[in-house]
Amino acid sequence: MIKILFVCHGNICRSPMAEFVMKDLVNKKGIASEFYIASAATSTEELGNPVHYGTRNKLAQVGISTKGKYAVQMKRSDYQEYDYIIGMDNWNYRNMLRIVGKDKEQKISLLLDYTDHPRDVADPWYTGDFETTYQDVLAGCQGFLAYLQQQGKLDS
């Protein structure tokens, strides 16, 4: 089983969007049983809050529900729990390292590093543009799945 943790600042916009987009992609490919996918925050600001209405609304437009998801914080122990810990931007990357310490097993990366255009995922908390964030997240998740395929880590 491939265990993935998506991470952003508050776990209400980008990382839950990535969590549910990835769950949708692997479900549609019939390989959901090969994955455990979750998301978390680097901060405590939004803990216990539901997914931001902008993310919920954008994902609902494409038939994806975030029902039951509430913000949780990343823990040091997540480093051992997950195979891949994928952040949304460089600020998250630094905070993820602060939480886990050294990345000895090179599990920590950024989502758009799996695309042809590595950059930070647009943050809709500031931009209000959930469509651009969705396009970034979708491209990153698709790129990550292609990476796993290339690495021979998928049975399908």
Image (cartoon, rainbow, N blue to C red):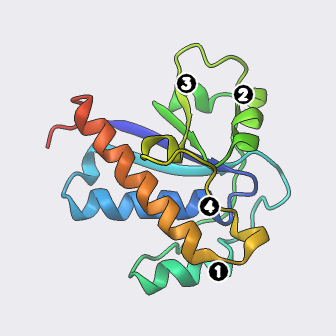
**Which amino acid does the dot numbered 2 rest on?**
Leu
- In primary-sequence order, the first of circles 1 and 4 is 4
First in residue order: circle 2 vs circle 4: 4
The residue that disc 4 covers is 14
The C terminus: image quadrant = top left
Residue 59 position within the rendered picture, expressed as x and y whole percent measured from the top left: 49, 77
Secondary structure state at the residue bearing disc 1: helix
Q: Nearer the viewer, mark 3 or mark 4?
A: 4
How far apart in space, not on screen, are marks 3 and 1 (Cα)?
A: 32 Å
Distance CA(mark 1)–CA(mark 2):
28 Å
- Mark 4 Cα-neighbour bin, 10 Å: few <14, some 14–19, many ≥20: many
Quarter containing the N terminus: top left
Q: Report whether 22 appears left or right of 46.
A: left
Residue underneath mark 1: 54
Element marked by disc 2? helix
Q: CA distance from mark 2 to mark 4?
A: 19 Å
Q: Quick check: 137 left or right of 88?
A: left
Residue depicted at x 38% and y 44% = 144
Q: Amino acid at mark 3?
A: Gln
Q: Earlier in the sequence, mark 3 or mark 4?
A: 4
Which of the marked residues, 1 or 2, is nearer the chain's N terminus? 1
Which residue matches tag 2? 97
Tell me residue 117's x, y (percent).
Answer: 49, 48
Identify the element where label 3 is drawn.
Answer: helix
